[in-house]
Image (spheres, grey):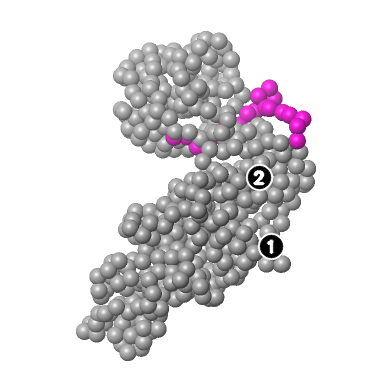
């Protein structure tokens, strides 16, 4: 790289490069791919590009010869700014498009996103990413980046003759606490506490998200789950004011995890009091059905299916970890709940980091699973009803060898083949196991395309995780951290 250009970038960036540890625990080296994730506050300096003397620039991702950044950025600045994306080109390729250069020799094609806003978010691909102001006033910005740097020149690619299994994939925040609001419900006259993570109906998901101030994900495929795979949740639309989903009496659910028929999935049945026939508290499915038969209430069976795993129920609860300190080696053991706070009506789960189908970071929790053996090992609730949900589940790939990491078997984090926003997203997962045929040649796989490529190349095998011919199915919704 031209020395003058390099000096200019160093002046602009200042201590930013040193303070963003792209190596160590915030960097996953995938041979020619490196993970980048950070939040940082930076201050602008004079834009050293020719013809930009009276402008300000804050470089977020500096140039790295032969490399391309891509991912997403969110920023908040002290004054309206533009987002600048630079693309390194040969000088001879400069044929009238907007360019940026320090010395007139090394050129970058320039893409300017002009929201002139103090904050924003977007996806990017380019050689340099920065924030820019057309006036001379210095500005400060806080930026969060979640992305990758892909190296395209051989001299940058790190190689080794040591076995890949001697290396560890070290991603920042591989496990985090996820706090979720709880709801109070009733089963057969007894109080239960549950969470709502997903809904097949977008309006229902948005309404509950707003009310509980925590996002319920849309999962369209839930509307197609087998009728034997869910219970009912009776939601009152009028009557006695209370803490139910619609602001009336507590919702009534069919079963608790102590029942063999229990499922984390519930079909929404709306219950409304008829004029002059009540209201009073109905505290069981049978009481509701009796009231419907006698004309006190009317029931409307909707098409909406929600994921409503119970946390606390009569004579039972999800296992709360005694050791609250999470590590890559223990995150899947000793239970998946860190805390249940009845005063604040919240439950805190272990959030597991993984990759979505497009390589973006996801976090998921685990509320239960089947068959019984693996569920007992993880100290999660055994949910036999999940076994009939395989056709309505998403694939979750875990690794049984290769690069060591925070996955359940001690290797790299898993990959989901669907995520919220996808038409195929489901909170229910069927687990498949990836094995490298030659673990010494293992590398990080970050998305579903990576998995498919390695299958076609013959480098890996993929098998369903099963115990005694029973596939391993989890209730593992993807959540917002």
Q: Is residue 374 left or right of residue 137?
A: right
The residue drawn where x is 31% and y is 28% is 78
On the image, the x and y values in percent for residue 148 come to 56, 34
Q: Dot 2, how many residues are within 10 Å of its Cα: few (below 14), some (14-19), or many (20+)?
A: many
Q: Is residue 320 magenta?
A: no
On the image, the x and y values in percent for residue 58 come to 41, 23
Where, by quadrant of the figure, is residue 215 drawn? bottom left
SS for tag 2? loop
> Mostly what secondary structure, the magenta segment?
loop
Residue situated in front as seen by the camera: 225 or 443: 443
Name the mark on residue 43. Answer: none
Q: Which residues fall within the magenta stretch?
A: 144-163
Q: Is residue 441 left or right of residue 417?
A: right
Residue situated in front as seen by the camera: 435 or 207: 435
Position of 456 relative to 121 (above/below): below
Whether residue 399 is visible: yes
Residue placed furthest toward the front: 322
Residue named by callout 1: 466
Would you say the residues marked 1 and 2 are in contact, meaning their CB atoms lie under 8 Å apart? Answer: no
Q: Quadrant of the N terminus?
A: top right
On the image, the x and y values in percent for residue 117 come to 33, 33
SS for tag 1? strand
Residue situated in front as seen by the camera: 458 or 102: 458
Query: Tag 2 or tag 1, which sits nearer the N-term?
Result: 2
Q: Is residue 146 magenta?
A: yes
On the image, the x and y values in percent for residue 389 come to 58, 67
The residue drawn where x is 65% and y is 28% is 152
Q: Is residue 353 left or right of residue 54?
A: right
Whether residue 268 is visible: no
Name the mark on residue 411. Answer: 2
Q: Give the spatial CA distance, label 1 vs label 2.
A: 19 Å
């Amino acid at each position: 790289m031209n020395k003058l250009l390099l000096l200019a970038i160093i002046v602009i960036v200042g201590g930013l490069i040193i303070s963003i540890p792209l190596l160590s625990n915030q960097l996953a080296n995938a041979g020619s791919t490196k993970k980048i994730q950070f939040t940082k506050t930076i201050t602008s300096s004079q834009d050293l590009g020719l013809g930009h003397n009276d402008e300000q620039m804050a470089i977020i991702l500096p140039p790295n010869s032969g490399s391309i950044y891509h991912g997403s950025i969110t920023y908040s600045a002290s004054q309206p700014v533009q987002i600048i994306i630079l693309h390194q080109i040969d000088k001879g390729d400069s044929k009238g498009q907007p360019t940026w250069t320090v010395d007139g020799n090394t050129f970058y094609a320039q893409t300017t996103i002009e929201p002139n806003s103090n904050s924003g978010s977007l996806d990017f691909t380019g050689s340099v990413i920065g924030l820019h102001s057309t006036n001379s006033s210095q500005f400060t910005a806080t930026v969060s980046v979640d992305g990758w740097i892909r190296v395209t020149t051989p001299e940058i690619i790190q190689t080794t003759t040591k076995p890949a299994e001697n290396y560890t994939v070290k991603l920042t925040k591989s496990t985090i606490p996820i706090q979720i609001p709880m709801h109070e419900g009733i089963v057969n006259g007894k109080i239960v506490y549950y969470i709502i993570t997903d809904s097949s109906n977008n309006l229902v998901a948005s309404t509950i998200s707003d009310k509980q101030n925590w996002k319920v994900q849309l999962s369209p495929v839930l509307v197609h789950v087998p009728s034997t795979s869910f219970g009912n949740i009776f939601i009152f639309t009028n009557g006695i004011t209370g803490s139910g989903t619609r602001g009336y009496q507590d919702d009534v659910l069919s079963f608790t995890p102590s029942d063999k028929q229990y499922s984390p999935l519930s079909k929404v049945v709306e219950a409304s009091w008829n004029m002059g026939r009540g209201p009073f508290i109905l505290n069981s499915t049978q009481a509701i059905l009796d009231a419907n038969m006698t004309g006190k209430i009317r029931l409307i069976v909707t098409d909406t299916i929600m994921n409503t795993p119970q946390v606390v129920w009569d004579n039972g609860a999800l296992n709360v970890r005694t050791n609250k300190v999470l590590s890559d080696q223990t995150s899947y053991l000793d239970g998946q709940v860190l805390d249940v706070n009845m005063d604040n009506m919240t439950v805190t789960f272990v959030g597991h980091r993984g990759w979505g189908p497009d390589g973006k970071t996801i976090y998921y929790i685990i509320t239960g699973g089947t068959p019984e053996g693996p569920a007992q090992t993880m100290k999660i609730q055994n949910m036999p009803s999940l076994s009939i949900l395989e056709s309505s589940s998403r694939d979750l790939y875990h690794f049984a060898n290769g690069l060591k990491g925070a996955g359940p078997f001690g290797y790299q984090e898993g990959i989901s083949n669907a995520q919220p926003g996808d038409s195929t997203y489901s909170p229910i997962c069927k687990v498949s196991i990836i094995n490298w045929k030659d673990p010494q040649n293992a590398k990080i796989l970050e998305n579903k395309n990576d998995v498919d490529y390695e299958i076609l190349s013959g480098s890996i095998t993929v098998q369903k995780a099963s115990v005694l011919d029973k596939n391993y199915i989890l209730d593992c919704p993807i959540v917002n951290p």
